[in-house]
Amino acid sequence: MRRARLASVAVILVAMGAILTTGCPRGGSDNPWAASGNKPKVLVSFAPLYSFAASVAGPDAEVKCLLTSTGPHTHGDASAREIELARGCDVLVVNGLGLDDEADGIAPKLEKVTGKPLNILNLGKKIDASWLREGECNHEHAAEGHDHEHGTDPHVWLSVRCAKRMVESIRDELKRLDPDHAAGYESRAGAYLKKLDQLEADGKAMLANKQERWILSFHESLNYFAETYGLKIAGVIEVDPGKEPTAGRMDEIIKKCQNPNKPVRVIAVEPQFSSQGAARSIRNTLLGKKIESEFADIDPLETSPEADLSADQYEAVMRKNLAELARVLR
């Protein structure tokens, strides 16, 4: 009897060793798409694209997001979860324009580590070239007359017309992947496009009576947003997100704010950046010069807690941003 028990234990241990060695089979509990069944599996790079895709997908497709709190600027190695998500998706939807598709961006990395070509929908390539804006300088000016490329500003999701083109592109790809549910994708996309039109109209109405139009941006995220709602960006505090400006740049920013032809009193700050030291310093300096500057909390949705992801998140955050500007602008 003792020998039989030992033999049984040995069999169990061998089986356990085999599981630990080989891992769970594909489609098991380690597969993030296990509950998706035969639905199209849509993987997006970050939060705004999640709202766009989820609004079009409805119950007919499964949508998951790669980057949440880390945002699209992540330059580390792809995590095991990200690799599994990419390996099982039917389409990887990215913003493009150098944000998540550049050489060290998440899309090329995932294509390399998964060992197979991915179906990548690059939304930036779907946007009319005439709608795109040049990016800001990403370094201090060493001398006047310097010559360099600024690249393209990738923050196109903050433009309503660009957001609509992105939604349309996602709709078209889902119809291609899943023609049996094409009518549903078409209907939901149409309803969401109307929401975006209403968002733009409401935002313009909220700011219509404001005399102030110039604002200071925390980093180069608000150009398309400003263009949509008739605002002007006087400059940016951090040319490299997360890197405090030099004393020389601080002086340059303060001079811009004091320009009598375009005085700047409103400073946009972003919840994603815990350090707002430069913004506070600029505000205090302006207050000392009798300029009653104010902060406006503007969320460009570059990062988002995973729990906040939803089909309605983009519209809700944009409306909150507009309400904040309506509060501080005069």
Image (cartoon, rainbow, N blue to C red):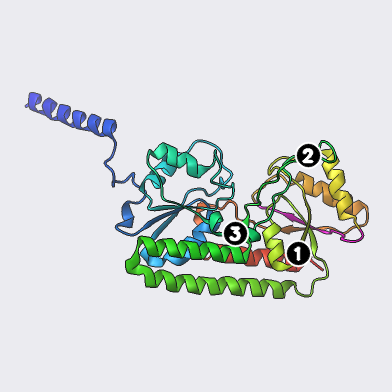
| Residue on which disc 1 sits | 231
- Vertical position of residue 302 compared to residue 314: above or below: above
Residue 57 falls in image quadrant: bottom left
What is the C-alpha distance between the residues marked 2 and 3?
27 Å
- Relative to 266, 287 lies left or right: right
For the stretch drawn in magenta, the main secondary structure is loop
| Residue on which disc 2 sits | 140
Identify the magenta region.
260-271
What is the C-alpha distance between the residues marked 1 and 3?
17 Å
Q: Which of the two residues, 96 or 252, is positioned nearer the viewer here?
A: 96
Disc 3 secondary structure class:
helix
Q: Earlier in the sequence, mark 1 or mark 3?
A: 3
- Relative to 290, 133 lies left or right: left
- Asked if labels 3 and 2 touch by Cβ distance under 8 angstroms, the answer is no
- Vertical position of residue 3 compared to residue 197: above or below: above
User: Mark 2 belongs to which amino acid?
Assistant: Glu
Q: Label 1 neighbourhood size at 10 Å, few (<14), some (14-19), many (20+)?
A: some
Q: Which of the two residues, 198 or 151, is positioned nearer the viewer here?
A: 151
- Relative to 325, 301 lies left or right: left
- Asked whether residue 98 is drawn in magenta, I would say no
Q: Earlier in the sequence, mark 1 or mark 2?
A: 2
User: Mark 1 belongs to which amino acid?
Assistant: Leu
At 79% from the left edge and 66% from the top edge, which residue is drawn?
329
